[in-house]
Image (tube, grey):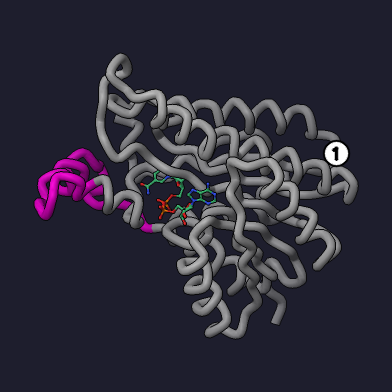
């Protein structure tokens, strides 16, 4: 049986949880050898266990995407083990757990979010692109957010990081358009993952925030990590061969209102 990603080496950052885990599993089901890069080794082992249960292949490499040496050694290790890197999903990210107006936001929170979400994506792209250029091909998908398209009141650093990812995606897509490398982004809306669950229940046990989020959704429900994964796999497939520098919104209609 021919599967879409047979013999391909696919990197998923943030693959120990949520959207990254669902995408790593989806790639593995389609034949890819998946490398999961994350700071959460326990979650990473769980993703590997699920993938191996399906008789597919995966490897965990401890990586902090905000640290140059960590990202450089991740790519070196992938290339020395497998010889090449076909697709990279730069998805690791964090959100702010407290809401604050821009003038009241804390510098530590700003530094943490920008260094993981924005610098982390740039660092991953930097070392992935060097390798993909030497191969003459490669595909990159970055996780932005609807918070990269519209305002996200109370979360200025997160919104700035996600707007920044779209600028990086478009710029690199243009720079490398003639090198066989395609770069795009996904913009998820409210997707039910551990990150969103933490945010929705930050006021204790109440479901009030969750109900308020669902009420804003034209679709009448939250999205699933698997729905984002499907879009990432499509962007990484030959079916999306003429798509460059785009941001695909997966939000159940949230941002069209
Ligand atoms: P999640 O918390 O379930 O998963 C995030 C993963 O990133 C975790 O495994 C975590 O350990 C990892 N991570 C955090 N810091 C890291 C670092 N420095 N280096 C390496 N890995 C690190 O969250 P999720 O909802 O699956 O989020 C995945 C991505 O999707 C994030 O970039 C997030 O901003 C984005 N996103 C999520 C939603 C949503 O509603 N869930 C919406 C829009 C965008």
Nearer the observer, 84 or 176? 84
The structure residue drawn at horizontal position 24% and vertical position 42%, both measured from the top left corner, is: 217
Q: Is residue 29 left or right of residue 160?
A: right
| Disc 1, SS | loop
Q: In this view, does 240 lie to the left or right of 137?
A: left
> The N terminus is located in which quarter?
bottom right
* Residue 233 visible in the current orientation: no
Image position, residue 137 (x, y; %): 83, 48
Give the residues in magenta.
Answer: 200-224
Q: In the rendered structure, does residue 180 fall within the stretch colored magenta?
A: no
Q: Is residue 37 left or right of residue 181?
A: left
> The C terminus is located in which quarter?
top left
The structure residue drawn at horizontal position 26% and vertical position 45%, both measured from the top left corner, is: 199
The structure residue drawn at horizontal position 40% and vertical position 24%, both measured from the top left corner, is: 107
Image position, residue 181 (x, y; %): 78, 43
Q: Which residue carries the number 1 mark? A: 179
As displayed, is residue 15 above or below residue 140? below
């Amino acid at each position: 049986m021919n599967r879409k990603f047979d013999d391909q080496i696919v990197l998923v950052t943030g693959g120990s949880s949520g959207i990254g885990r669902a995408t790593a599993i989806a790639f593995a089901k389609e034949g890819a050898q998946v490398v999961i890069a994350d700071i959460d080794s326990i979650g990473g082992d769980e993703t590997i266990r699920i993938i191996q249960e399906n008789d597919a292949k995966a490897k965990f490499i401890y990586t902090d995407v905000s640290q140059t040496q960590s990202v450089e050694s991740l790519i070196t290790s992938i290339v020395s083990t497998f010889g090449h890197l076909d697709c990279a999903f730069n998805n690791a990210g964090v959100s702010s757990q407290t809401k604050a107006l821009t003038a009241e936001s804390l510098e530590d929170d700003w530094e943490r979010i920008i260094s993981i979400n924005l610098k982390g994506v740039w660092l991953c792209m930097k070392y992935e692109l060097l390798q993909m250029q030497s191969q003459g091909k490669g595909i990159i998908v970055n996780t932005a957010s609807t918070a990269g398209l519209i305002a996200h009141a109370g979360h200025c650093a997160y919104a700035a990081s996600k707007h920044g990812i779209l600028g990086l995606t478009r710029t690199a897509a243009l720079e490398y358009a003639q090198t066989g490398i395609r770069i795009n982004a996904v913009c998820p809306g409210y997707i039910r993952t551990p990150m969103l669950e933490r945010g929705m229940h930050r006021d204790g046990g109440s479901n009030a925030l969750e109900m308020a989020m669902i009420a804003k959704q034209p679709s009448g429900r939250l999205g699933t990590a698997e729905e984002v994964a499907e879009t990432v796999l499509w962007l990484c497939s030959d079916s999306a061969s003429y798509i460059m520098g785009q941001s695909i919104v997966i939000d159940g209609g949230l941002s069209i209102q």
